[in-house]
Image (cartoon, grey):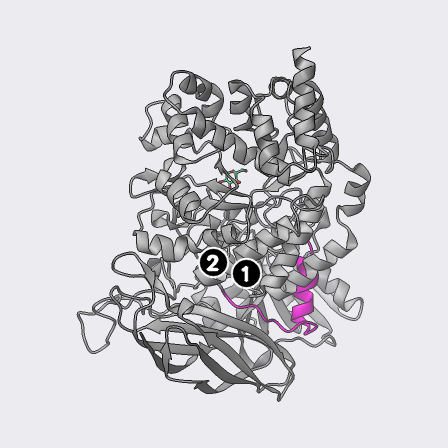
Amino acid sequence: MKKIIILFLFYSLTIAQNKSVEERIDSVLVLMTLDEKVGQLVQYSGGWDTGTQTVRPSEAHEKLIIMGKVGSFLNVFGTESTHRLQKIAVEQSRLKIPLIFGLDVIHGFRSIFPVPLAEACTWEPELVEQSARWQAIEAASTGLHWTFNPMVDIARDPRWGRIVEGSGEDPYLGSLMARARVIGYQGKKLSDNNSIVACAKHFAGYGGAEGGRDYNTVDISERTFREVFLKPFHAAVEAGVGTLMSSFNEIGGVPQSGCRFLLTDILRNEWGFKGFVVSDWNSVGELIPHGVAKNLEEAAQIGLEAGVDMDMEASAYYNHLADLVNRGKVSLDILNESVKRILRIKFYLGLFDDPFKYCDTDLEKKTILNKEIVNATREVAKRSVVLLKNENYLLPLSKEISKIAVLGPLANSKDDPLGPWAAQGKPEDVVTVVEGLKNKLGNRTEIIYEEGCKIDGNSKEGFSKAVEAAKNADVVIMCVGESRGMSAEARSRAYLDLPGVQEDFVKEIHKTGKPIVVVLMNGRPLTINWINENISSILETWFLGIQSGNAIADILFGDYNPSGKLTTTFPRYVGQVPIYYNHKMTGRPYDKSNFYTSYYLDLENSPLYPFGYGLSYTTFKYSDLTLSQNKMNINESITVSVNVTNSGKYEGEEVVQLYIRDLVGSVTRPVKELKDFRKIILKPGETKKVEFIITEDKLKFYDINMDYVSEPGDFKVFVGTNSEEVLESSFMLIK
Ligand code: BGC
C-alpha cells in the first residue's frame, strides 16, 4: 500500500504539467532514499569501443538499474539498447527515474564531419552551429541524450594530441565556437526529441599541460586562466550549456576535479551555472595518484564538496557517499543539491514525461547517414580547408589534365579521414582523395595511384614505383600527414615533423621536376619547413570526415575557392612551442641590434604560418583603414572601417580580422588580441567596406587587482588578412 501511495505521489507530482520543474524535482527528491540519491550521481560505461551499433551493458549493470544505483550510462547507444535499459529503469526500479545516455559525439555520430579544429578554420560560427545541429539530430535518433562535447580547451601547444578536439589557441574565436556548438547540440529546446545536452569540457586548463604531454601538470596564473582558458567555458555557460566535465589536470597544486574554487566559486557563484558537472573518466579516483586524497573515500568527499555532481566510472560515489553522509562527514544538503542538478537536466530533456522519446527505431534508420546530413559534411569539409601556399597559381587545376599521379599513404586511406573520436564513423562511408578525384573527373583523366610509403615506418620500397608514376603524370598530388590515431587523448608527440619517411618521399618525387600539390591530413600543426620552401602548392585539410575526398577534389579543381584560416600558429620547429600570436612583449622584445633581447641563437622567433593565416585562389587588398574618432569615452564607441578589394581573378571569401592592443596597462597586455572578424564574399574587382564597432567591452581585462575593467590610455587597432599582415591605426580611451 505504501508503495502505491509513493508511486501515486510521484506520478502526480512529476507528470503534472502545471508544476514548475523545480517543484517536480523536489517532489522526486522527497521520495528518494539515500542510496537512490547516490545512484543518480553514478555513471558507468556500458561498453568499450565495441565498434557495433548495439552496445550491451552487462547483467551487473542491469541489476544496478533495478536497484536505482546508477543514473547514467556512457557508451550505450542504438534505440534497441537504450530502449531496453530505459524500460528496466522506468518499469523495474522503485522510483522509475529515467536514465540519461551519453557518448562522445565530437564531430558526428555516423555521418562524420571534419574534426573540430578543422571546423574552427571556417571562421563561420553559424556553419559550426549547423554542423552540431546535424550531429545532434543523428545522435538523438539513436537513443542518445547527451554528448561530451564541445571540447573548448584552448591549446597553445601542438605536441598535445587533444589540440585536434578544440578550436585552437584564441579565446575570442574559441568562445564563438563554443557557443555555436552548444546552441547547435541543444537546439531550440532541450525537450525537442532531436536535441541533446552539450557538455563543455575539460574544465579547466587541461590544454596547458607542461611539455604538451597529456594529463601532465598545468601551472598558469589566475589572470591567464581567466582571460584565456576560461573564456570559452564562460561563453558555453552563457549559451545555456547543460553540463560541464571536470578535467584530469591540476593547476597550481589543485586537481581540477577536486577544485571548489573552480567548480563552485567561479562556475556556480560567479557565473550562475544551473546544470551539472560530470567528472572525466575516473578523474575523481585520480585524486589519489595526484596525491590529494588518501583513498577513494576521501576522493569521493573532495569531489562532491568541490562540485563534481556525477562520478564517471570511479565508483567513488557509489562506494562511499552514502556512508560519508550517514557518518555526518558529508552534508546531505550538498548531496541533495547534486541530485537536483541531475534531475533538472532529465526534466529539461522531457525524460520524465516520455522516457522513450529518443527510442524510435524507424526514425533511427531514416536518420543515420541521411543524404542531407552527408551533404552537410561535404559543405563543412570544403570550407574547413586552409590553403597554405600556391606559388604561380598552380591551383586550381584544370579539369582537362590528362594524367594525374595521386601519391602517398593518405591518398586512398578509408580510415584516417574519419579522424580521432569518430564515434560510429565507418571506413566504408569514407570517400578517399583517389575516389573523390575519380568522382570529379570521370574517365576524362587517368589517375595513377601509388602509396609510396606508410604513414610511419622506415621502408622506402614503394618510392621507385611512385617516382615512375610521377614521371608519367602531368601533375602530382601527394597526400601525406598523420594517421588518425596520432592525435586526441594520450597521443602527444615530441616531434612535429611528418612521421616516418614521408618527407623523404616528397623530396624524391620533387626531384622529378613535376608540379606537386601537397595535401596534408593531420590533427595538429606540423613543422613542414622543407615542404613550405620547395613545394609550390600546399593544402591543410586536417581530417575532413566521410566526404573528405569529394571536398578536397572540389577545392583542387576550383569548384570551391578555399576560404579557411588557421586558428593555431604553425611553428617552424618544435623548440618554439608553445607559440601563439597573442603573446606578451617581455621587457626585452627582440631587437636585432641588441644581443641581450628575447630570441633564439639558432632560429628566428616568427612562426611558419601565423594565426589567422590562409590563402585564396584570388587575392585581397586592404586599404583606407579609418576610425570614426580617435578618442573614445567609456560609454561611446568607435567605428573602424576598411576597404577590402578582390584584386585577383576568382570570386572568393575573405576573413577580415580586427585585433587590438592596449599599449600601457596596470598589467602587461598581449601584443595583439582578436576582437572581431567578418567573413565576406567578393567578386573579382569588387570592393566592400567592412565595419567593426569597438565598445568598452572589447577593451576589458583583469587589472592589477583582478578586477575586470578597461583602463584609460592608448590603444592600437589592427585590421588585416591574418594576425601579422595588418593595417594599423590608434585611439585613446578616456574616462
Ligand atoms: C576523455 C573525455 C571523454 C571521456 C568519456 C575521457 O577519457 O578525457 O574527453 O569525454 O573519456 O569517453
Q: Residue at x 38, y 83 (%)?
A: 729
Residue 403 to residue 182: above or below: below
Does ligand 1 reach within 8 Å of label 1's beta carbon?
A: no
> Are the two marked residues, 2 and 1, in contact with CB atoms closer than 8 angstroms?
yes
Residue 604 to residue 115: above or below: below
714 part of magenta stretch:
no
Q: Residue at x 45, y 35 (%)?
A: 308
Left or right: residue 587 compared with residue 105: left
Mark 2 = which residue? 168
In this view, the residue farthest toward the top is 1
Q: Tell me the CA gap for discs 2 and 1.
A: 8 Å
Question: Residue 66: where, in percent of width, then height?
Answer: 64, 18
554 part of magenta stretch:
yes
Q: Residue at x 62, y 87 (%)?
A: 686
Nearer-N-terminus badge (2/1): 1
Disc sitting over residue 355 in the figure: none
